Amino acid sequence: MIKRSFLGLVKPALQYNLVPDSVQEIPVPRKVVLLLKASANGGPHGTLKVGDSVKTGQRLCASPDSTEYVISSVTGTISAIAPYVGTLAEKYTAITIDAGGQDEWDDEFDKTPSLDTALKFFQFAPGNPCFKPFADPEKTIKTIVINGLDEDLLLTANQQAVQNEAAKIKDGIGVLKKITGVDRIFIAVPETLVQQASTTGAEVKTVNAVYPNSLPHMIMKDVFGQVVPAGDTLDDAGVSFIKAESVAMLGTAFKTGHLPVTKVLTVAGKNGSTMNVKARIGTPIKDVLRACNVSVNDRDRLVLGGPMRGVATYSEDLPLEPGTDGIVVQDEADSAQVTDYPCINCGECIRICPVKVPVNMLVRFLEARLYEDAAAMYDLHCCIECGLCSYVCVSRIPIFQYIKLGKYELSLIETAEAANE
Ligand code: SF4
Ligand code: SF4
């Protein structure tokens, strides 16, 4: 595999939104849908049944020994349980809960901070914090970086947390230290949020607020001077990233004894306006859009996430997930349509790629489904998934989507090979 450095970095002039919007809380929906991942160790299950009553904050899993779970965001009754297939064929169970009035809080969550508690209750928390590497004997995490910038343009959930919830982040840092035993904690923020970040107790690092500098691999390179080798994870480098929103939520949860059941996200409408809203996890997208007075017509584009890295989706019935930082609606007339035009070797994608992947060659191999060659010869694993190549491609080739599909297909091949060894 070719391992390329970040030398020759080209800085695109795409600025993050720096002024966080205020947050409007939208009403509890009549029903929520929670997507429960298929458990690696679990098959069909019987713990959950239609008609079961659930409380707010209740941990729901397929079977007692299942590794996957969701946290109910409302008090109510399970009205449907159905299989659901995600964007890249991930298998889920969709649990629909009819909300029934006032919240009645489940009391299983123990407020004493510990790694076991974090693993048992915070996997489904806003921002998808991941504590598994801290429990993995093969990983040694010595540094935690709190990301105070969102990882896409337009989105401001994390900037909002730093600006308005620095005290909660400070509480969360105290919890993080107890849970993980890691004392070396940094917070990475744009220049405009240094003052608020400095009250959290973490060591402040400044990020130049130009896309894609907020992506963890870029922060590692620009702020810490460490290039993570292609194919390695940040955990392999001994660093764990966690979003500012997740840290604020940790602080609040261990203070109040209530698990987090809401998510802050940015909604960008067709006229380019943005607003930040807080909604119960599992709220159907259409309810979020209605509360923001954003309409979606046939052939408009609905994107979950931000404009550079988000995933276009086909239905407003999909639920808000813990990792959904934004919803972007683009008018049909303003949406750049992808094409099946061939690459014309203009080189724009290579010039803008922050890790200098030979994208023009890579995309040829991905289009031909030669995934192993794409990884071995054309740096598929070097890609940090910023989406800039798709953004500039004059032939409008959906390069970013090819890359995501390629990595997914390769992971299936590698899993199958490992199983056969
Ligand atoms: S998405 Fe494209 S531009 Fe971004 S790192 Fe990957 S190959 Fe480079
Ligand atoms: S920007 Fe598009 S057309 Fe130009 S070299 Fe890259 S893939 Fe080919």
Image: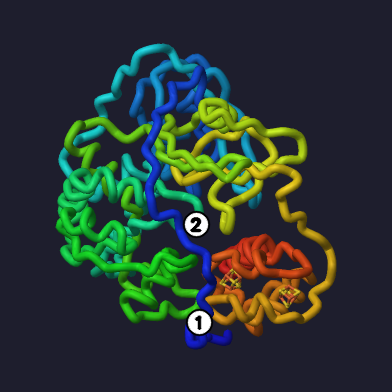
Q: Position of residue 67 (x, y in %)?
A: 42, 45
Q: Which mark is residue 152?
A: 2
Q: Quadrant of ligand 2?
A: bottom right
- Residue depicted at x 47% and y 50%: 155
Q: Which of the two residues, 121 or 418, is positioned nearer the viewer here?
A: 121
Quadrant of residue 221 within the rendered picture: bottom left
333 on left or right of 229:
right
Mark 2 neighbour density, 10 Å: few (under 14) some (14–19) many (20 or more): many
Q: Amino acid at mark 1?
A: Leu
Tell which residue pokes out farthest to the right in this image: 341
- Residue 287 visible in the shown view: yes
For mark 1, what is the residue?
A: 9
Q: Amino acid at mark 2?
A: Asp
- Residue 94 visible in the shown view: no
- Residue depicted at x 33% and y 74%: 223
Q: Position of residue 29 (x, y in %)?
A: 48, 21
- Residue depicted at x 50% and y 32%: 34
404 on left or right of 249:
right
Answer with mark 1 or mark 2, whichever residue precedes in sequence.
Answer: 1
Quadrant assignment for the N terminus: bottom right
Say which element carries label 2: loop
In the rendered image of this protein, does residue 350 appear above or below residue 250?
below
Quadrant of residue 375 within the rendered picture: bottom right
**Cβ(mark 1) to ligand 1 < 8 Å?**
no
Say which element carries label 1: loop
Evaluate if marks 1 and 2 touch, with contact meaning CB atoms under 8 Å apart: no
In the rendered image of this protein, does residue 207 appear above or below residue 148?
below
Q: Which of the two residues, 188 or 4, is positioned nearer the viewer here?
A: 188
Q: Position of residue 156 (x, y in %)?
A: 42, 49
Report the Cα–Cα distance between label 1 and label 2: 19 Å
